[in-house]
Image (spheres, helix red, strand yellow):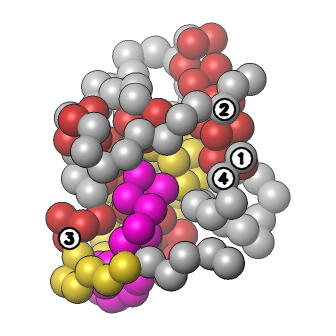
Amino acid sequence: MAVYRIVQEEDPVLRQKSKKVPAVTPNVVRLLDNLKDTLAAQKTGVGLAAPQIGITKRVIVVRLQEEENFYELINPEIVESEGAERDSEGCLSIPNWVGEVDRAARIRVKALDRMGNPAEYAAEGYLARVFQHEIDHLDGILFVDRAIKLSPAEQEK
C-alpha cells in the first residue's frame, strides 16, 4: 500500500470533526491498509487516526508494541467508560511534546471491522488510553487540549 506523511499540529485538518463512514468499501479497506503501513513505518507510535494523514473519515488503527496484530476500527464509539487514570501521552502529529492526561481506566468501544461487521472491544489501561486518544482525533481534539501538564519530549539519540 502506501506510507503517508503524518500531518503536523498546525494543519487545520486535525481540528475538523471526521465524517462517519457510510459503508465499508474497497476504498475504506485501502485506507485501513495505508494507515497500518504509515504507522508501521514510524519509529514510535502505537495508533493512527485517518485525520493524521489528512483524511477526515472516522477510521483508526492501533497496534501495541507487544502485539503483532492491528486493531482496525471504523466509526469507533465509546459506549461505556469507568474509572480514571493519569498518564503520559505523546502524538505523532505533535512530536516535540508529551503531556499528563486524565483518561477513563476502562472503556467499551463499538465499531465496524474491515468487513463491515459490528465489533466490540473491552479495553483497560494502556489500550483504553490509546483508543481514547485516537478517537479524540476523529473529533478534532488533540492530547494537548486535555493535558494537565506539558513538557518537551526527550529527543532520540
Farthest right residue? 68
Residue with the mark numbered 1? 41
Q: Is mark 4 on a helix, strand or loop?
A: loop
Badge 1 amino acid: Ala
> Which region of the structure is painted magenta?
84-101
The alpha-carbon separation of the residues under discs 4 and 1 comes to 4 Å
Category of crowding for the residue at label 1, using alpha-carbon neighbours closer than 10 angstroms: few (below 14), some (14–19), many (at least 20):
few
Q: Where is residue 84 in the image (x, y as percent from the top left)?
A: 30, 86
Q: What residue is drawn where x is 41% and y is 68%?
A: 96
Tell me the CA gap for discs 4 and 3.
Answer: 24 Å
Residue bearing mark 4: 42
Q: Position of residue 73 (x, y in %)?
A: 52, 41
Residue 25 sits in quarter: top right
**Residue at label 2?**
3
> What kind of element bears circle 1?
loop
Instruction: Return the x and y of residue 94 as percentages of the image width and height.
Output: 38, 59
Given residues 50 and 110, the one toward you in this image is 50
Q: Are marks 4 and 1 in contact (CB under 8 Å)?
A: yes
Foreground tag (4 vs 3)? 4
Asked if residue 149 lies in the magenta stretch, the reply is no
Spot the residue most to the top. 26
| Quadrant showing the N terminus | top right
Tell me which label, 4 or 3, sits earlier in the chain. 4
Residue 98 against residue 95 in the figure, above or below: below
Give the residue drawn at x 76%, y 72%.
Answer: 66
